[in-house]
Amino acid sequence: MENKWTFLEEGDKRGVPVSPFLSTSGIVVKHRNEEGGMGIFFYKNATAGGDWIIQERIENSEWVSSLLPEKAPLSTFRVITQSRASIDWTEGKEPKLDDIDALSCVFRAGRAGAATDHDSILFDIDPKTGILLKGTTNAHWYRLGLHEALPGMCPWRSTHHATHHPDGDILVEGNQVPDFKNILTLVETSHMKLCPDVPLVGWDVVLSADKSLPVCLLEVNLSCNFFRGSFDKGLYLDFMDDSFRALHRKMISRESGNDDKK
């Protein structure tokens, strides 16, 4: 599922509301200031065996837009789910929805003028109520260079302190995500249908302006992090403990020469 085209194809086949893609064979892009056959780029669509996924632009819903400044990018919700079906997974195993738990949710409120919500304020969301909590930033994760390790340069940590979006002084804290329970059910069901053997999955969820597809999955991330979101540590640590115990049993079994599939 890390292959974004595989994710979209499989999601579409299994009834998961993924971001829509176009079936055109490709697109041609021409540089505005080059002539003589130069500055032309051909992008062959994945639907025609190419390497590019060509999609219509997705716009933020009216509710999401109300929390953002003008010229903000598509701003998504990162939801992390865990799958107990992944413990001692065997081919043919039938996963159940009860095997999947949504752990955390973060609203990535994009900055004004940014191309994507990777440049954003990360507002934590109470996973039980869908209420937006205080925000923070992870911009320091991406600062490069040895000089950043010097005292007083790059901060090691950031705190949840933001109540407003800094671009426009828009109050975000205290708002409630609409239809939040159904968003969690969507990602839990998608984890069960698409990749139940994967322990932890990060979903990028879009609340869109398209009334025919108001909620959809932009992509799935299998090397994911919580983006500073709060989560039930007891639930998570019990899952980690059980997962590593299962891996340890498999390691011991293989070292002893037994083919243990219990």
Image: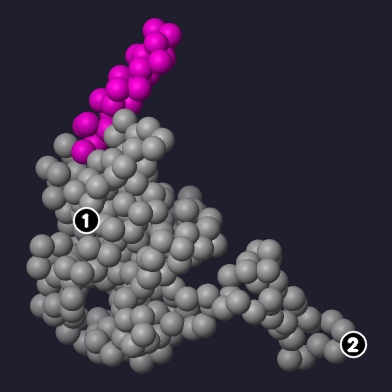
212 to 105, vertically: above or below: below
Q: Which quadrant, please, contains the C terminus? A: top left
Name which quarter of the figure residue 240 lies in: top left
The question of residue 184 being in magenta is answered with no
* Residue span colored magenta: 239-262
Q: Mark 2 falls on what kind of element?
A: loop
* Residue 102 badge: 1
Residue at (40% x, 89% y) in the render: 71
The question of residue 240 being in magenta is answered with yes
Name which quarter of the figure residue 40 lies in: bottom right
Q: Is residue 4 visible?
A: no
Amino acid tagged 2: Gly
According to the picture, the residue beneath numbered tag 2 turns out to be 36
Amino acid tagged 1: Ala
148 to 119, vertically: above or below: above
Q: Main secondary structure of the magenta part?
A: helix
* Residue 15 badge: none
Q: Is residue 242 visible?
A: yes
In whole angstroms, how far apart are the C-alphas of marks 1 and 2?
55 Å
Q: Is residue 9 left or right of residue 65?
A: right
